[in-house]
Image (cartoon, rainbow, N blue to C red):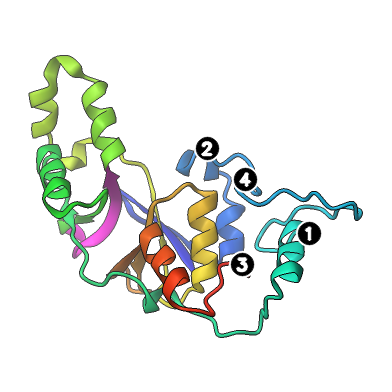
Amino acid sequence: MFAIYNNNGLSFRSTVDNLYSLSNVDSIAKVRNNVNEGLPKDHSTRPKKRLYENDKVNEATQIYRDIANIDTSEQIFHVKDLMTKDVIVLNQDNTLQEAYNLMEEKDIRQIPILDTNENNKIIAMINQKDILNSILNDLEYVNTTLRRPLSSFDLGEVITADPITDIRRVAKVMVDFSLTAIPIVDQDDNLEGIVSRANILKAVANTPPLQIWS
């Protein structure tokens, strides 16, 4: 299960299939113009099937399975099994400077933002690129920009996943939407953790038989 939050709170909660069918998907990640972006190319001579969408397996993935002899009946790993539970957060009243300082101090690249007026519900994510773009957009008033509260910036929407979501689905969403991390939020909109690309790579390296391909 996936959800989308913005400054107004929860705007979407449904299956991964419906996440991909959203009409505003390009506004979430402009670089994602093709569902199959980042997938291995099919160089076989067999007749090509339609490339998959909505989590259907495409031919290239099936070829990979055949070569690697992957058993798709293996244990499913949920994102709660490898997420980081101690999440560093900010609220909408913190400034851009405070966001930058916290990233430097904790050596992290993105931070969830909570709305203190809504019982600390997630409303956005800020990353290093957001901070850099905000500064570059107004170089004449850098100090003023750094003192602005995060609520004054348009940080767009944030995609989240439920704690019991299959990690393979989360990994695919991260690739397709060019995300470096996904906050993990329960059905009551409470932030439970965060999973990053580093978490997934560590799991793949250290937890056989975890497999990203589903």
**Above or below, comparing residue 197 to residue 139 in the picture:** below
The amino acid sitting under disc 1 is Glu
Q: Are marks 4 and 2 in contact (CB under 8 Å)?
A: yes
Left or right, residue 113 beside residue 146 = right
Judging by the rendered image, the residue that carries numbered circle 4 is 37
The front one of 15 and 133 is: 133
Q: CA distance from mark 2 to mark 3?
A: 22 Å
Q: Is residue 155 visible?
A: yes
Query: Mark 2, residues whose alpha carbon is within 10 Å: few (<14), some, or many (≥20)?
Result: few
Identify the element where label 1 is drawn: helix
Residue 118 is inside the magenta segment: yes
The front one of 211 and 18 is: 211
**Residue 140 % position (x, y):** 15, 14
**Residue 80 % position (x, y):** 38, 77
Range of residues picked out in magenta: 117-127
Identify the element where label 3 is drawn: loop
The front one of 75 and 2 is: 75
Judging by the rendered image, the residue that carries numbered circle 2 is 31
Q: Nearer the viewer, mark 2 or mark 3?
A: 3
Identify the element where label 2 is drawn: loop
The amino acid sitting under disc 2 is Val
Q: Nearer the viewer, mark 2 or mark 1?
A: 1
Residue 212 is inside the magenta segment: no
Identify the element where label 4 is drawn: loop
The disc at residue 142 is none
**Residue 116 % position (x, y):** 15, 58
**Residue 197 % position (x, y):** 40, 58
The disc at residue 59 is 1
The amino acid sitting under disc 4 is Glu
